[in-house]
């Protein structure tokens, strides 16, 4: 019964900023990875950023230097600070939570998605 609830999406002008949040609840294994994916119309869903419980991060090339992922382990919440937004960043952004037990049995959960629109 893990649930991920996203917030923070909206409409911004090119060059603007947004901060997305995703709060997870339920029975969550502490050793996990949380990440953000996005899906634009007509395109496949892509991973844009991920962060482990220990703070290791990974970014898609398209957002490096502009987006920053962070998390608060005590709140089971992951954030995505998005700066210098471009029209190409327009997409539905999905939060993801993932962990693996005993070197197998991967568990994966998704948020409902939040719309980010970058337009003048």
Image (spheres, grey):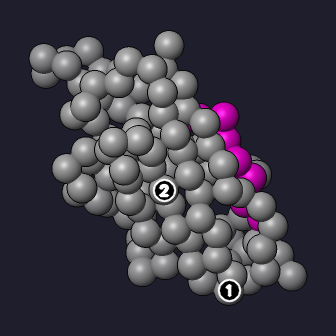
Q: Residues within 10 Å of mark 1 (few under 14, many from 20)?
A: some
| Whole-percent x, y for residue 38 in the image | 59, 51
Q: In the drawing, what numbered circle is on residue 79? A: 2
| N-term mark: 2 or 1 | 1
Q: Is residue 119 above or below residue 96?
A: below
Camera-nearest residue between 98 and 27: 27
Identify the residue at horizontal 49%, vertical 78% (top origin). Answer: 66
Foreground residue among 78 and 67: 78
Tell me how many marks there are: 2
Direction from residue 37 to residue 50 in the image, left or right? left
The quadrant holding residue 98 is top left
Marks 2/1: CA–CA distance: 19 Å
Q: Which residue in the structure is indicated by mark 1?
A: 15
Kind of element beneath mark 2: strand
Image: magenta residue range: 111-117
Residue 43's place in the image compared with 76, above or below, is below
Image position, residue 58 (x, y; %)? 31, 60
**Residue sitting at 61 percent across and 36 percent down?**
5
């Amino acid at each position: 019964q893990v649930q991920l609830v996203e917030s923070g999406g909206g409409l911004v002008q090119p060059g603007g900023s947004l901060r997305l949040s995703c709060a997870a609840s339920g029975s969550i294994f502490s050793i996990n990875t949380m990440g953000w994916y996005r899906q634009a119309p007509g395109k496949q869903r892509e991973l844009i950023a991920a962060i482990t419980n220990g703070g290791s991060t990974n970014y898609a090339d398209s957002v490096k230097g502009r987006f920053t992922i962070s998390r608060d382990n005590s709140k089971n919440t992951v954030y995505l600070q998005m700066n210098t937004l471009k029209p190409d960043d327009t997409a539905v952004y999905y939060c993801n939570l993932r962990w693996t037990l005993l070197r197998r049995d991967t568990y994966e959960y998704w948020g409902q998605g939040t719309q980010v629109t970058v337009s003048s």
